[in-house]
Amino acid sequence: MSANPLDTALHSLREAAELAGLDPKVIELLSVPKRTMEFTFPMRMDSGEVRIFKAYRVHWCDALGNFKDGTRFTGNLTLDELKALALWMTIKHGVGGIPAGGGKGGVEVDPGELSTWELERLSRSFMRHLPMKGAWVDVPGADIGTSEQTQAWMLDEYEQIIGYHSPAAVNDKPAAVSGTVGSAEATGQGVYYVFEQAVKDFGFKEDCSVAVQGFGKVGAVLAGLLYEGGYKVVAVSDIYGGIHSSEGIDIPRLQEHVRKTGKVVEFPGAEPVSNEELLELDADILVPAAVQSVIGEENAPRIKARLVIEAANGPVTPKAEQYLLDKGIPVIPDVLANVGGATVCHFERIQGLTDEYWDLERVNGQLKEWILKAYHKMLETAKEKDSSYRMAAWVNALLKIEASVKKRGWV
């Protein structure tokens, strides 16, 4: 199986569809995106030079509701990557009980090369040129290379275009711009709720060891929560490399180190370790929280963890997962474990549409209730179907989507 994320996503779709007994016409419908948009726009740089940027937006399936989420600003962006992410988002919404379809998009750019003013112009230009948008059409959220600030600029640009306020038209905004509290931490917070429950269900000790690959928006939040919860975080990494300490890492001190240096490497009292080596450490639980396809056929035989929880999108390839399962290493899939961000985006949209804004206790309380309901449904289906947890989560989502597709008369 190729490490192409679209191949990975479609492999899961076909396998789960067969397990669910899906109508062949529904499978055909879900095997391709409903709509793919590729567009360009010019932008004047601070130097006075005009650059042409390539942008994309993929709509996969909107049987459950309007498209939403995910906008990436990365230099290596590909259409296949965005198609995979849009399909995964479609399934995540189904898994999480969220009435929405899957969308993903972005701009081919390295945001680290842009000034603050250029990043603002890029964010506004993307929103201005995006062919379809609006609270009931397509709601862009943040992802790699984007942030609360880029989303605030996007919302402001959209509202300038339409001439009135529409806070539900963009997700992952700061609370000061009609966003929701807890949005930035939502994905990591959701993974933590799943982690806590899995520790109980799989019989791990309360101070079990954890390796977290990735110390960005998700991994850093998760590592902090794990530390506060009394778990032993023995390794973390970012794009520059990783660190390891069998005694456990002081995450608050590490977070301060990262604020000062911009990276986790050279943290006092820890040994250096590469991202590849981190995956193979002797930890009870492994949490890939960076990018897709980091565990493949080559390194799967060297994984020593007794449980893998996917905080990133598609970090384990299908053949690698089968190897892990054959070794008795369960995998809690991305479409369940990291659905917290999509769930809180749904809460954000509710708040924007009603002008009733929630406090953090309500946001996190609702998030925990929603994600654990989906988690227990996944376990129930896995037992009923004698399947992996990934297939169980996908089956649960696909059956919801199929029911809507048929009632709508699409097939």
Image (cartoon, rainbow, N blue to C red):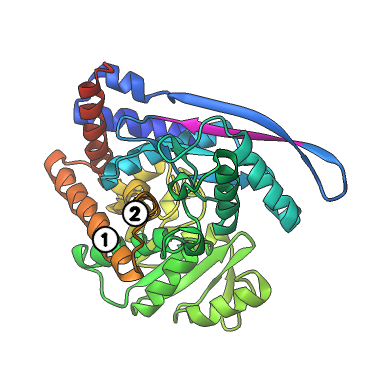
* Residue beneath the point at 51% across and 68% down: 236
Residue in the foreground of this view, choosing between 149 and 158: 158
Q: Is residue 28 visible?
A: yes
Mark 1 surroundings within 10 Å by alpha-carbon count, few (fewer than 14), some (14 through 19), many (20 or more): some
Quadrant for residue 304, please give it: bottom left
Give the percent coordinates (x, y) of residue 66. Answer: 38, 35
In the rendered image, residue 115 lying in the magenta stretch gets the answer: no
Residue corresponding to mark 2:
347
Label 1, on which residue? 366
Report the span colored magenta: 52-60
Instruction: Assign a secondary structure to mark 1.
Output: helix
What residue is shown at x 19% (from left), y 63% (from top)? Answer: 201
* Residue most extreme to the left: 384
Q: Main secondary structure of the magenta part?
A: strand
Residue type at tag 1: Gln
Which sits earlier in the primary sequence, circle 1 or circle 2?
Answer: 2
Badge 2 crowding class, 10 Å Cα cut-off, few under 14, some 14 to 19, many 20 or more, is many
Marks 2 and 1: in contact by CB < 8 Å? yes
Image quarter in which the C terminus is found:
top left
Instruction: Indicate the secondary structure of the residue bearing disc 2.
Output: helix
Q: Is residue 57 magenta?
A: yes
